Image (spheres, grey):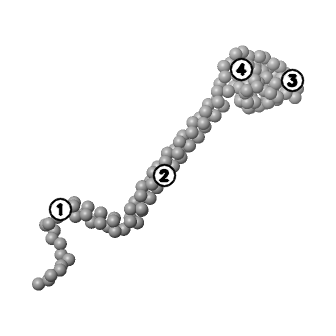
Amino acid sequence: MLKYSTYHSIYNETPGAASACRSSVSDHMNPSVINTKALIKKARIVLKQQAVFKLMIVLLLIISGFTVVSQVFASSASSLQQEKRIVVEPGDTLWSIALKNKSSDMKTIVYVDAIKRHNNLNGSDIQAGDILSIPIYK
């Protein structure tokens, strides 16, 4: 008969207790497992913080983009106060007329488009003697 044996009965212990006992023994026997688990936990926290930071930056860029776009369109849709009629002189272009008559905060190209819409012009062709109705924005 054998005096020492490596056999363990499956009926002596509950399965949960056996696995808990084995893991605690293995953790105490191998401290690098504890360090690795702690490092992985810390790395997950840092990655989550970085993901939140990246998401905040993307949202900030999107919001600022919408703000810029709305300002561009807001300048073209300013309230029309009145209009002025001018006679096109020789050498005048829509661009030169827009530069003379636009408000300081409005972009020239936006004002040229407003003149075209206001006078139902398809292109930029104007001739000396034409009468244009120039919108005046506040």
Marks 1, 3: nearer the viewer: 1
| Amino acid residing under circle 4 | Tyr
If you read the primary sequence from the N terminus, does the residue marked by circle 2 or circle 4 appear first? 2
Position of the C terminus by quadrant: top right
Task: Give amino acid for label 3.
Answer: Glu
Residue 39: x and y in percent read 44, 59
Q: Nearer the viewer, residue 47 or 129?
A: 47
Badge 1 is on which residue? 14
Q: Residue at x 56, y 43 (%)?
A: 57
Which residue is under mark 4? 137
Earlier residue among tags 1 and 4: 1
Residue occupying the point 86% across, 23% down: 89
Few, some or many residues within 10 Å of mark 4 (<14, 14–19, 20+): some
Residue located beneath label 3 in the image: 89
Q: Work out whether residue 56 can be spotted.
A: yes
Above or below, 91 relative to 45: above
Residue 61 % position (x, y)? 58, 40
Q: Is residue 94 left or right of residue 49?
A: right
